[in-house]
Image (spheres, grey):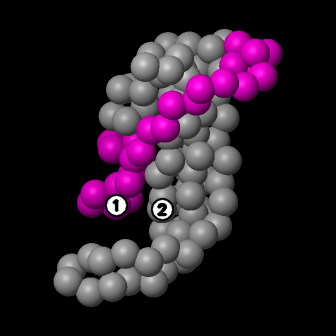
Amino acid sequence: MADYVQVVTTTDSEQAAAELARGVVEARGGACVQVVPIRSFYRWDGAVQDDPEWQLQIKTPAARLDSLVEHLKAHHTYDVPEIIATPIVGGNPAYLSWLDEEARG
């Protein structure tokens, strides 16, 4: 497994995204969270939905992934939140070192 991951989740309001992002950083689940407005299409309760959402992109050491997932599940407003981790296969060594420092558990 890679040493670092980017975790993506979405939420239904800018305020909920900001609260979730701040909580992740405060809990040291991730060193950096970027919030981006998006438009999502998906099937839920038997119908296709078309909704504005806010995507959180969280960078963290892979060793913090389980803790981050548990934090997101505990603080998320969705019944079944999207939580997807993608390996970071390379990058600026100084930035990756900063991830380690800021997300230490």
Please tell me which residue is depicted at 50% across the width and 47% down the height of the picture. Answer: 8
Sequence order check, earlier mark of 1 and 2: 2
Q: Is residue 11 magenta?
A: no
Left or right, residue 70 beside residue 51: left
Q: Secondary structure at mark 2?
A: strand
Q: Image height check: is 91 above or below 38?
A: above
Q: Image height check: is 75 above or below 105?
A: below
> Is the residue marked by circle 2 packed among few (<14), some (14-19), or many (20+) residues within 10 Å?
many
Q: Amino acid at mark 2?
A: Thr
Q: Is residue 86 magenta?
A: yes
Could you say where residue 54 lies in the image, as x and y percent from the top left?
57, 63
Please tell me which residue is depicted at 47% across the width and 52% down the height of the picture. Answer: 9
Left or right, residue 86 beside residue 92: left
Please tell me which residue is depicted at 64% across the width and 67% down the height of the picture. Answer: 37
Q: Secondary structure at mark 1?
A: loop
Could you say where residue 7 lies in the image, as x and y percent from the top left?
50, 40
The residue carrying mark 2 is 11
Left or right, residue 29 beside residue 71: right
**Residue 58 lies in quadrant:** top right
Q: Image height check: is 97 above or below 79?
A: above
Q: Amino acid at mark 1?
A: Tyr
Could you say where residue 15 lies in the image, as x and y percent from the top left?
59, 62
The residue carrying mark 1 is 78
Q: Are marks 1 and 2 in contact (CB under 8 Å)?
A: yes
Could you say where residue 83 lies in the image, as x and y percent from the top left?
39, 47
Residue range (magenta): 72-97
- Image quadrant occupied by the N terminus: top left
